[in-house]
Amino acid sequence: MKRRLASTDLIPINVPELGKKTAIHEAGHAAAIYLGNKQKQLPPVFFQLHIQAQGNNTPTTECLCTSYDTCTHNMTKIEGGRLIHTLPASVDTAISGFSDSEKQAYLLAYEADIINLLAGPLAEAYYLALRDDEPISPNLITPNSLHYYGGASDLESVNQYLACLYTDPLQQTAKLSELFLAAFEFVNTTSHWQAIVALADTILGSRKDVLNCAEIMSVLDIYSYRGRNSAWC
């Protein structure tokens, strides 16, 4: 997903740290798409990770850019991964002719997409809290604060999903809180977090332009299994 933390002035950006945060962020999306959807017994979906390799002109410390989004050394972006390919004008209208089981399946997929969007910036926030030895919980971070973790674009997409689901802002807020908690619990699960970190390490160490779906799933499968038997957090 696109990062967006804009500024009108040139700001110093720590390139290696931006690379780590972005890798964790995109790995969070990928882990939720694959592991989260699989847990919910949702159908498989195509996704892959595009990686911009660091070249000889890449700064080893800092660069000056107008925003994190426009930094040319922002190296990783996920493609695909959505279960709902086209948002309806109204979910109620879209599923009005569905059977009860079809409605349930559609809404499960719809909510999964929202959780998967939130998982990226939440993974980045989780990484920074661990790095700085700070506590993190759903009581200490809010959906709106995900703007500070490269999540502005993700939140825009989430709000589009919610607007198609409910017209009442209070219902939208309640659903966002519910799915935000689900996304946090996903990232906070030891096996999932270990898989996210392993995939981020794979991204940072890769010499490829693209990690395909099979390669991503292989890493996530191996390390999520190991994480179930690990005390690492």
Image: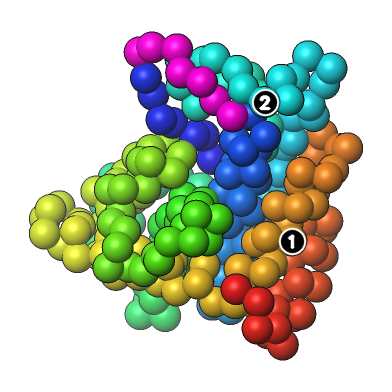
User: The N terminus lies in which quarter of the figure?
Assistant: top right
User: Which is more toward the observer, 168 or 233?
Assistant: 233
| SS class, disc 1 | helix
Q: Is residue 95 left or right of residue 117?
A: left
What's the magenta region? 8-14
**Does any portion of residue 82 appear in the rendered image?**
no
Q: Position of residue 169 (x, y in %)?
A: 12, 53
Q: Is residue 199 left or right of residue 139?
A: right
Q: Which label's residue is closer to the chain start, 1 or 2?
A: 2
Write the residue at 20% across / 57% down. 172
Q: Position of residue 40 (x, y in %)?
A: 54, 77
Q: What residue type is disc 2 on? A: Thr
Write the residue at 39% across / 76% down. 104
Circle 2 residue: 61
Residue found farthest to the front: 133
Q: How is the image coloured?
A: rainbow
**Does any portion of residue 162 appear in the rendered image?**
yes
Q: Position of residue 214 (x, y in %)?
A: 82, 58
Q: What residue type is disc 1 on? A: Ala
187 drawn magenta: no
The numbered dot on residue 36 is: none
Q: Quadrant of residue 95?
A: bottom left
Circle 1 residue: 198
